[in-house]
Amino acid sequence: MLELLTNAEMGEADRLTIAGGVPGIDLMERAGTAVANSLMLRHPPRSRVTIVAGSGNNGGDGFVAARRLAERDYVVEVLRVGTGALRGDAAVAAQRWTGATEPATPARIAGAHVIIDALFGAGLDRPVAGEARAIIDAMNAAGCPIHAVDLPSGINGTTGAIMGAAVKASDTVTFFREKPGHLLLPGRLHCGRIHVADIGIPAPVLAQIRPATFRNAPELWIATFPVPGLDGHKYARGHAVVLSGAVESTGAARLAARGALRAGAGLVTIASPRDALAVNAAASLAVMVRPVDDAAELTEFLADARRNVAVLGPGGGVGTRMREQVLAALKAGPALVLDADALTSFAGDLPALTAAIRGRAAPVLLTPHEGEFSRLFSGLKEAAEAPSKLARARAAAAATGAVVLLKGGDTVVAAPDGRAAIAGNASSWLATAGSGDVLAGFCAGLLAQNMPEYEAACAAVWLHGEAGTEVGPGLISEDLPEALPAVYRRLLAR
């Protein structure tokens, strides 16, 4: 269940299911029952449950949950927000509830023991204000567990944005498939534990919807993941080149090189300025070091087709020299990972970088963090005005023709053809100097083994997250390549 459905796509899934003969009230009954069942796993009978119900289908799910919980000997109160009449399936669900329904007020919510948030669903597209905002604030202030229906009220299911105010849930029960807003920040921080319930939407509807957004997990890319055979050799596993910066900033390149080696590249060479050769050589064992001082020497070095991937940017310095080296590499043959200073050096001149990328056959992977992305793509209207991180990454990939890996706690990988994956396994301990350099190296190590660029980027992000969890507290970036063997063992044991 890797597919992530936007609000519109989930609405279409409902519509197709109902058109196929499943009554909408049946879907609502199953959704509300799933919410009740999830709550019952964590709270025993006789628990007091306050259900905050809105006027839409989310509220209808809440009424079903109320009935199911009351049948199981829970003490249930339903509080309605708004005075508008319920319609359609939600009205039917409310009629089936035989208990009392009272107006929601902050005072009534203040004493709640457990709350079911059935106020708004994933489709909220306007800022929360007035009574609804006061109720959301009251739910958060109650200090009790909150079980959200579909998505915490106030979170946009497509973008993950907070629409003025949002419930902070302990658990969220969603239906059929997750939404991007369950993984994108800040929405993800409001969801708590996420449970996906089967409510009877047939899987074949996905073929009609054709979703292009996915949770980043091994099932997405494992079919193309490189595993060496017994008859393999290092030359068959590719040769990654990492361009080093000046003597005072060689660490980033060495981290990327170590990452590429651990990720499986058969050979790795640091292309080093001559004044940094001794430093790079002294700090490297399996990684080779060769002198490369300028764009002309880089062109000559990359002319050997066996050097099939290069990383430029980590610790490389911002300016004319880096621009020239990037353009030289783009004219050469290998796949490229452009990170950090390689991207910032084109700030204000995205067309020059884009033209060079689109003029080559080999893949290009851009790996910016948010700051680098903003500097590089500030002039791209589609990215600057995009409503979410997912949309920004997609716009950048479409504009440049490169795979874009937009880093963060919710890293997005977007391909020019519209496919995108959102990470769900990042460790907070990854927020440390050099972590992104290692990630660039992981990408290069997989590209060196001829893994397709979109899948390689997705796999590298997942491996990076797992390595961060493997090390945990006290992590420094040097630990990440060394954690990779344990991650690989678990991955390949599947």
Image: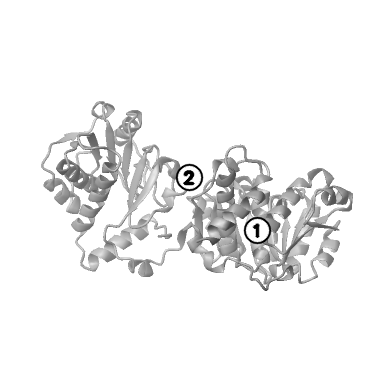
Give the camera-side residue of 425 and 285: 285
Q: Residue shown at 39%/56% (left/top)?
A: 6
Whether residue 395 is visible: no
Q: Residue furthest left?
A: 98
Residue 185's disc is 2
Judge from the rendering whether residue 172 lies leftward or rightward of residue 437; answer left or right.
left
Judged left or right of residue 91, residue 192 is right
- The percent position of residue 420, horizontal first and vertical second, equals 50, 60
Residue 32 rendering spot, x and y as whole percentages: 23, 49
Q: What element carries label 2?
A: loop
- The CA distance from mark 2 to mark 1 is 28 Å
Quarter of the image where the N terminus is located: bottom left
312 to the left or right of 401:
right
**Residue 64 visible in the displayed image:** yes
Compared with residue 98, is residue 301 higher up or lower down, i.e. above or below? below
Q: Residues within 10 Å of mark 1 (few under 14, many from 20)?
A: many
Residue 134's tag is none
Residue type, mark 1 in image = Ala
Residue type at mark 2: give it.
Leu
At horizontal 84% and vertical 67% (from top left) the residue drawn is: 300
- 77 vs 10, nearest the viewer: 77
**Residue located at (85% from left, 53% from top):** 273
Q: Residues within 10 Å of mark 2 (few under 14, many from 20)?
A: many
- Which is more foreground, mark 2 or mark 1? 1
**Camera-side residue: 90 or 352?**
90
| Residue receiving disc 1 | 263
- Residue 125 is situated, as x and y percent measured from the top left of the image, at 37, 48
* SS at badge 1: helix
Q: Residue at x 59, y 62 (%)?
A: 456
Residues at circles 2 and 1 in contact by the CB criterion of under 8 Å? no
